[in-house]
Amino acid sequence: MKISQKRRFAFSITLAGIALAACGGGGDSSESTTTSIAPTTVAATEAPTTVPETTTTVPVALMPLTGQPVVDEAIAVRPAIAAKIDNHPGARPQTGLNEADIVYEENVEKWTRFAVVFHSQGSDPVGPLRSGRSQDINILTSLNRPLFLWSGGNGAVTSLIQKSELINMSASAASNGGGFFRSTDMKAPHNLFSKTSNIWALDAGRGGTPPPQFSYRTDGSAPSGAPTAGLKLTMDGNMKAAWEWDAAAGKFMRFHEAKAHVDSNNIQINMDNVVVIVCEYKFSSADKNSPEAQTVGTGAAWLFTQGTWTEGTWSRADNLSPWTLTDSSGEPMLLTPGRTWVELARDKQAVVVPAGSSVADTPWP
């Protein structure tokens, strides 16, 4: 099913009822715009009539994939780039994970692989890039024709990508204009990189502005979840990862087993939100050895944000739909505006670390 361009554009920017910041002063406070109307002059036999002051609140446009205020309108309406980044030990440290709006971690044949979504900012370079999987189609289609940046894949996967709404930006499809190169610091096949600036330049109007994928708290309120120290995961291929809440940084920090997971700038991977989507994996029609996350339907979901966690459910009616997260009382699970990591985990692949407990001392699931 295709979505009309008019419907797609309607998703381009989210509005929230937040007063515009006052001009000047250099402070962080904001105030609404107040308009006063002078008293009306009437006959001497009547008392003067004063029209009450009226206050006008102008909504602020928000970036669709972070829920943060728009700074540059041209960036706000550009398409998303979804890059497939390697997570093999030979691919670390990666480049671009700390610049992404959303990262999906998928089970593949061994280890895991990342579908890294750029929109509010890019990464030059980005990588190492590896092949895509059939599961990427359902995961990423809701981004409204994202530019799919990957090394390429087997014939069956390539055919599925070409028939999908993802815009193929593989090394062969994008050619020389894609900014692809092989790094001499890593060994093949873990050394292919590109540049998001090149990929956006090749768009030529084929990609669409992404709609929001999650709902955010926009009123400055605190989350309602229970306190937590973090979580631990054992994904396929005995790939172990952990997230630990850092109150001083106000972020969840990522680890590979007991070692900090750092990027190529030696900065630890960090996120404002971590969402665990518990889903079934089936075998891909393109490759019977390749697992395929079932991300349309419903299942259990956990939200980790601001040092809290909430358990509930996720649902998606189809692959054009964003994620709907609902807590046990039926209320929406709202993310903190910022960057989000999504763990596409099988049942019992993740465990919550309670507040006051040590992440290091908590057993792996």
Image: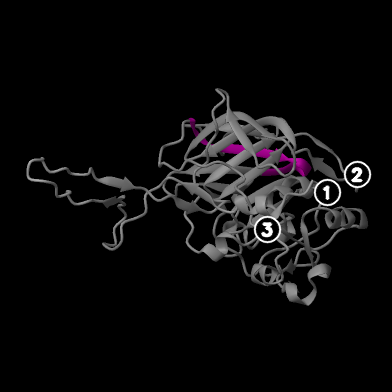
Mark 1 burial class by Cα count in 10 Å: few <14, some 14-19, many 20+: many
Residue 219 x/y as whole percent: 41, 41
Residue 134 x/y as whole percent: 83, 49
Q: Which residue is mark 3?
A: 208
Q: Quadrant of residue 360?
A: top right
Q: Which residue is mark 1?
A: 134
Q: Is residue 90 left or right of residue 245?
A: right
- Identify the amino acid type marked 2: Ser
| Helix, strand or loop at mark 2 | loop
Mark 3 burial class by Cα count in 10 Å: few <14, some 14-19, many 20+: many
Pick whichever of labels 3 and 1 is earlier in the sequence: 1
Q: Look at the numbered discs 2 and 1 and tell me whether their residues touch, using CB distance below 8 Å.
A: yes
* Residue at image location 31% in from the left, 61% down from the top: 23
Tell me the magenta residue range. 225-240
Q: Nearer the viewer, residue 212 or 199?
A: 212
* Whether residue 363 is visible: no
Q: Residue furthest bottom?
A: 176
